[in-house]
């Protein structure tokens, strides 16, 4: 009997939280008094691909050596993912204070690069944005079309 | 006022509800789901093996997320560990998934894999915060609640001398949970597109194909330029996603077969044009929309009675 009751309770709670998620998906309004922490996983199971952008953006990582020369660092060494997964992961959207995380990433990359003899004095991370091209992901990645936004820079102590 | 008819109707509804959600039935559907999902997850996590240290350990770019509901005194669970400890945890995860796939200590394996998926999610997967990661976790929970090892498993081999044999009926409950969740996923994904501003025209599809997820084939297609057919394709997608959750449940006139066929075409196209392959596991999971009795009868027919 207890198993039956527990099973029915599980079903009803699951259905209820799924409905909360569906209501939020359809109306962007949360059901009152239901904490988001309980609904978030249910919402996330029905909410991929909601919008689009007309620009591509990528977090580029650069190292500067003692001669002030900037070299692009391959992010795959530290973030071994495809382009799409990297683009989402590097947004650090799980955190309110992203700046501290980016600073820590730049620090760790500088240390790792210098262990391998790169001799960098600083590492910079910046969002680079350019209009999408119908021919290639980097089709419009040109000096005239790219806008750069420095997110963080870590200097060697 | 005579409320007796209402009470008897409520009773009948409660019984029908319980029968639909929890009746005892043949174990074959969940056995097949277990093999398909376990194998899929083994592959999904297995390809991360060379990068475990970078993804989840203190030598990588690992920043765990503490869930808001987690009490402070147990938050140490999500401390980032040294690479050798993380590798050990990861190997336990893979072994659990392998054991689940072959049906060895099935419930324990599924439960362990579910807990470790949760752990790895908050350690390193949360950055990607995808729909399928949550679906995988919930699927493992459903498998942990099921008797999915009753057939096509090492457990069946040990108990009945043959992995194709089985001995007892199992609850349909986990199968219903799978079916319910898949339905709701398609329902939410489809219906929100009716009003989402981004999904009102073909631009959504066009710009997605030339974005971060675009495959070489997608760029080949878009190289021909903008075409109003993108509007048609977007509205076809919306139509399909809104109808598919209902079609799966309609047994007459081959409607569910049409729904599943269009689901197959949709997912294959998604994988061909966008590097988003993780939802492909939904295709074999469509089997949960067939009743265990139907699947059992079909298996008996194709095996010429060798499957009992």
Image: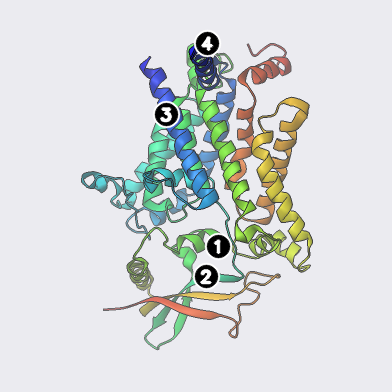
**Quadrant placement of the C terminus of chain B:** top right
Give the percent coordinates (x, y) of residue A17.
45, 39
Please name the residue shown 37% across and 86% down the image. A66
Q: Quadrant of residue A100?
A: bottom left
Q: Quadrant of residue B240?
A: top right
Q: CA distance from mark 1 to mark 3?
A: 39 Å
Q: CA distance from mark 4 to mark 2?
A: 56 Å
Please name the residue shown 60% across and 56% down the image. B196
Read off the residue under disc 1. Answer: A83
Label of residue B167 in the image: 4
Label of residue A58 in the image: 2
Q: CA distance from mark 3 to mark 2?
A: 43 Å
Q: Is residue B8 visible?
A: yes
Q: CA distance from mark 4 to mark 1?
A: 49 Å
State left or right for residue B164 relative to residue B46: right
Question: For the residue labelled by badge 3, is the local secondary structure a helix, a strand or a loop?
Answer: helix
- Same chain, labels 4 and 1: no
Question: For the residue labelled by badge 1, is the local secondary structure a helix, a strand or a loop?
Answer: helix
Q: CA distance from mark 2 to mark 1?
A: 9 Å
């Amino acid at each position: 009997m207890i198993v039956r009751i527990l099973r029915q309770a599980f079903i009803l709670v699951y259905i209820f939280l799924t409905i909360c998620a569906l209501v939020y998906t359809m109306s962007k309004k949360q059901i009152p008094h239901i904490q988001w922490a309980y609904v978030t996983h249910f919402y996330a199971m029905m909410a991929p691909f909601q919008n689009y952008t007309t620009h591509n953006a990528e977090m580029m990582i650069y190292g500067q050596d003692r001669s002030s020369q900037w070299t692009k660092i391959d992010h795959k060494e530290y973030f071994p993912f495809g382009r799409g997964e990297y683009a989402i992961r590097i947004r650090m959207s799980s955190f309110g204070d992203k700046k501290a995380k980016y600073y820590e990433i730049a620090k760790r990359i500088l240390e790792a690069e210098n262990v391998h003899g790169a001799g960098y004095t600083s590492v910079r991370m910046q969002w680079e944005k350019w209009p999408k091209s119908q021919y290639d992901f980097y089709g419009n990645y040109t000096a005239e079309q790219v806008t750069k936004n420095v997110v963080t820079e870590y200097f060697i102590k | 006022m005579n409320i007796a008819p209402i009470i008897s109707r409520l009773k009948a509804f409660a019984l029908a509800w319980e029968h639909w959600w929890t009746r005892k039935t043949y174990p074959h559907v969940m056995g097949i789901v277990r093999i398909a999902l376990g194998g899929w997850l083994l592959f999904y996590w297995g390809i991360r093996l060379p990068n475990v240290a970078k993804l989840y350990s203190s030598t990588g770019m690992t920043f765990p997320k503490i869930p808001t509901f987690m009490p402070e005194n147990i938050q140490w669970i999500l401390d980032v560990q040294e690479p050798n400890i993380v590798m050990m945890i990861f190997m336990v995860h893979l072994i659990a998934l392998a054991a689940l796939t072959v049906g060895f200590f099935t419930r324990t394996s599924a439960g362990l894999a579910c807990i470790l998926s949760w752990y790895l999610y908050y350690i390193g997967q949360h950055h990607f915060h995808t729909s399928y990661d949550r679906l995988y976790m919930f699927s493992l929970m459903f498998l942990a609640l099921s008797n999915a090892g009753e057939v096509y498993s090492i457990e069946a081999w040990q108990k009945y001398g043959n992995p194709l044999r089985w001995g007892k009926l199992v609850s349909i409950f986990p199968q219903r949970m799978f079916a319910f969740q898949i339905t709701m996923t398609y329902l939410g994904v489809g219906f929100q597109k009716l009003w989402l501003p981004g999904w009102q025209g073909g631009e959504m599809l066009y710009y997605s194909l030339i974005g971060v997820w675009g495959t070489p084939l997608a760029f080949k297609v878009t190289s021909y330029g903008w075409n109003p057919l993108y509007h048609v394709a977007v509205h076809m997608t919306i139509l399909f996603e809104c109808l598919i959750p209902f079609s799966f449940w309609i047994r007459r006139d081959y409607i569910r077969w049409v729904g599943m066929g269009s689901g197959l075409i949709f997912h294959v196209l998604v994988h061909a044009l966008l590097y988003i392959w993780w939802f492909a596991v939904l295709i074999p999971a469509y089997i949960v929309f067939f009743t265990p009795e139907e699947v059992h009868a079909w298996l008996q027919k194709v095996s010429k009675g060798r499957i009992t």
